Image (cartoon, rainbow, N blue to C red):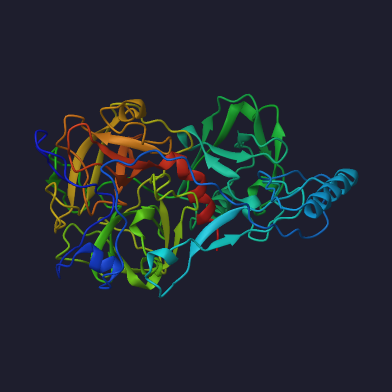
């Protein structure tokens, strides 16, 4: 959290967190080691919007005999080979495929980083774990076609009022689930499918849709195989489901603008320590999962789970509780290091977090939930309290910020088109209220329906609290499918 004089030049770009204490060590030494040849990436004061790099399609392994009723689940990939012989071979294969009525399958990709002893940044390329799918794979038909099961993820989501919606295999629509035949067992089953440990609450709500999904039989995993489209739900009653009690504060008194937070005020705020030093913030979203920023992992050693400790419920780095250890680090495969687009990572913990007055999860927003221009929100973290400082705060700081329309943030006076649709701006264009170094990966939360929703993940900005340079956050609603998809994986 930082205050900044609008009349002074802005300090350096802050998306990469700095060192912590004790002991006081530079961030570069903490993350990159003592080798002088290992240098952190240089970042401009704002990030230009480069076009995304070309993606080379992976080689696809076909498996099994295709079922005639299957359709593609993903976009097709085509690989071209040089030489006239290869061209003739390709044409022959294509003609044969058309004659057989075969529609090509493809693979989907997730990125899971594994421990690596090499600290060289040049070696820091994502290890891609490719999923292999048979021909004509159908998404969300409750039949696992792909080897890693990616065709059966992203089949469940939540709409307004936590309305449970399931994707139909026939046409890909998300439709509400009718409340008839709904039970507590179904609630637990669906939440477990999404990566939670069970359900918290479910209730009946009136649907605005003229069409719904009716449960057809007893419990079966996953739910997408146990629903059928119905012209309407009885009495227009549909399911509202909440998988976890979230977004609740124990302390509500606060002072606007860069003040010290109280115990229990932001119970989802986490401190992520790399080799004993605070490097980034994190956000608790369930007993097992933490969200943070992908740019918090710039080197191979930072991708080793054993180098990290997670602290929850702390409002002072001088009084830390027992830490939680990290089992797995998952970076968004679409994260762009040049533009910071989709700057999000998911940490799976070794053991479940125990909730109490000091430690609670933030609520994930529902699909397409809107937080318009001017919405008052809060961000928190252990980042520096003065622009240009290289020392993080010992105390958890908080600051009130307002959502700023993306069109405004992309104007020539602000970030000149660098804010993508997967980002959200918050702060004050006059300067003075912002997140800063060490806050990266922390929460931007907004209140709605008596709960606090995670709207953004602290990502980047130009300086701290500088005029016309608000903070930029990863937009959580844009990466919800990725979050739920990876929470479902073993």
Quadrant in the rendering for residue 418: top left
Residue 83 shown left or right of residue 50 in the figure: right
Viewer-side residue, 392 vs 155: 392
Quadrant in the rendering for residue 271: bottom left
Instruction: Name the residue furthest right.
Output: 99
Can you give x and y, in whole percent of width and height, for residue 431 in the image? 16, 34
Residue 464 shown left or right of residue 44 in the figure: left
Tell me if residue 365 can be seen. Answer: no
Instruction: Identify the residue at image location x=43%, y=73%.
Output: 116
Quadrant in the rendering for residue 315: bottom left
Instruction: Name the residue furthest front.
Output: 84
Q: Is residue 179 above or below residue 261?
A: above
Image mark count:
0
Instruction: Name the residue furthest bottom.
Output: 117
User: Quadrant location of the C terminus?
Assistant: bottom right
Can you give x and y, in whole percent of width and height, for residue 243 in the image? 47, 49
Residue 8 shown left or right of residue 249 in the figure: left
Can you give x and y, in whole percent of width and height, for residue 57 in the image? 63, 52
Tell me if residue 371 can be seen. Answer: yes
Residue 131 shown left or right of residue 373 in the figure: right
Viewer-side residue, 350 vs 211: 350
Can you give x and y, in whole percent of width and height, for residue 155 in the image? 61, 45
Viewer-side residue, 246 vs 6: 6
């Amino acid at each position: 959290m930082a205050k900044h004089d609008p009349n002074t030049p802005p300090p350096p770009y802050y998306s990469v967190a700095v060192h912590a204490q004790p002991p006081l060590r530079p961030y570069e030494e903490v993350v990159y080691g003592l080798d002088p040849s290992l240098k952190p990436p240089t970042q401009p004061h704002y990030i230009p919007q480069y076009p995304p790099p070309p993606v080379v399609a992976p080689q696809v392994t076909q498996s099994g005999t295709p079922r005639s009723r299957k359709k593609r689940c993903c976009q097709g990939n085509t690989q071209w080979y040089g030489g006239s012989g290869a061209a003739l071979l390709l044409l022959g294969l294509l003609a044969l495929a058309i004659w057989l009525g075969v529609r090509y399958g493809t693979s989907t990709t997730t990125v899971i980083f594994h421990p690596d002893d090499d600290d060289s940044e040049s070696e820091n390329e994502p290890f891609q774990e490719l999923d292999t799918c048979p021909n004509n794979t159908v998404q969300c038909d409750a039949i696992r076609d792909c080897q890693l099961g990616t065709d059966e993820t992203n089949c469940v989501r939540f709409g307004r009022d936590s309305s449970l919606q399931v994707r139909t295999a026939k046409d890909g629509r998300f439709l509400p689930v009718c409340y008839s035949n709904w039970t507590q067992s179904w609630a637990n089953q669906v939440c477990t499918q999404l990566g939670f440990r069970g359900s918290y609450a479910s209730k009946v709500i009136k649907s605005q849709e003229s069409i719904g999904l009716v449960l057809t039989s007893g419990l079966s995993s996953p739910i997408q195989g146990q629903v059928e489209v119905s012209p309407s739900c009885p009495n227009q009653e549909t399911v509202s489901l909440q998988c976890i009690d979230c977004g609740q504060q124990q302390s509500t008194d606060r002072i606007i603008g860069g003040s010290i937070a109280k115990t229990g005020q932001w119970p989802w705020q986490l401190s992520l320590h790399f080799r004993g030093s605070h490097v980034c913030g994190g956000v608790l979203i369930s007993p097992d999962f933490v969200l943070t920023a992908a740019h918090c992992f710039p080197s191979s050693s930072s991708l080793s789970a054993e180098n990290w400790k997670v602290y929850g419920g702390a409002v002072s780095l001088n009084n830390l509780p027992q830490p939680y250890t990290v089992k797995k680090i998952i970076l968004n495969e679409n994260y762009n290091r040049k533009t910071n687009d989709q700057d999000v990572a998911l940490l799976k913990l070794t053991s479940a977090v125990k909730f109490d007055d000091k430690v609670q999860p933030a609520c994930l927003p529902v699909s397409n939930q809107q937080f318009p221009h001017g919405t008052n929100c809060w961000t928190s973290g252990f980042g520096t309290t003065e622009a240009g400082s290289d020392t993080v705060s010992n105390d958890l700081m908080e600051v009130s910020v307002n959502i700023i329309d993306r069109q405004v943030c992309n104007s020539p006076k602000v970030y000149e088109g660098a804010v993508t649709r997967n980002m959200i701006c918050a702060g004050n264009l006059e300067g003075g209220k912002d997140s800063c170094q060490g806050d990266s990966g922390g929460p931007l939360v907004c209140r709605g329906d008596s709960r606090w929703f995670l709207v953004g993940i602290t990502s980047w900005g130009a300086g701290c609290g500088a005029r016309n340079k608000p903070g930029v956050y990863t937009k959580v609603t844009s990466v919800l499918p990725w979050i739920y998809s990876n929470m479902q994986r073993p």
